[in-house]
Amino acid sequence: MKIVAVTSCPSGVAHTYMSAESLELSAKKFGVNIKVETQGSSGIENKLNANEIKDASCVILTNDVEIREIERFKGKKVVKMSVSDVIKKSDALIKKLKDTFQ
């Protein structure tokens, strides 16, 4: 199973990267392939390409601000959560998505 995600927070610093790390650790724990794009104060990092998005079972958007280039995800199953919720509940989220899409 493959998931892609985009994380972004108002300041674009700590919580952006904390939520990305939380998702990556949870995905590893549950054997899920994930790539997380961060949109922070230094711009878009680890940018998702069209094939990665196409091959993903779903997209996680963990944003408290507007995601740049959101049109890339049109037609995909999208889960939206606040950055703080993802940091606290990433295990439950990844497990639920794995159970749903496998």
Image (cartoon, helix red, strand yellow):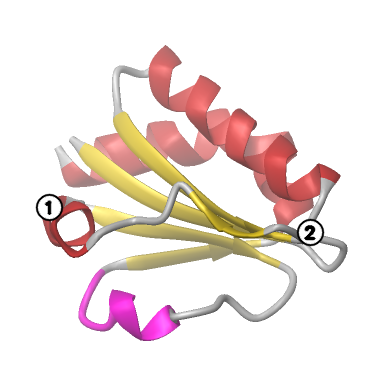
Which badge, 1 or 2, comes first in the chain's sequence? 2
Helix, strand or loop at disc 2? loop
Kindly identify which numbered label has been placed on residue 95. none
Q: Provide the residue span drawn in magenta.
A: 70-76
Q: Is residue 28 above or below residue 87?
A: above
Number of numbered discs present? 2
- Considering the image in quadrants, where does the C terminus appear? top left
In x, y percent, where is residue 74? 27, 83
Left or right of residue 101: residue 82: right
Left or right of residue 51: residue 20: right
Q: Is residue 7 above or below residue 78?
A: above
Nearest to viewer (mark 1 / mark 2): 2
Q: Which residue is mark 2?
A: 12
Please, what is the three-letter code of the amino acid marked with disc 2?
Answer: Gly
Residue pictured at 40% horizontal, 31% vertical: 95
Q: Is residue 65 above or below residue 58?
A: below
Left or right of residue 21: residue 69: left
Kindly identify which numbered label has been placed on residue 55. 1
Residue pictured at 65% horizontal, 37% vertical: 89
Residue pictured at 87% horizontal, 62% vertical: 11
Please, what is the three-letter code of the amino acid marked with disc 1?
Answer: Asp
Residue 74 belongs to magenta span: yes
Q: Quadrant of residue 64?
A: bottom right
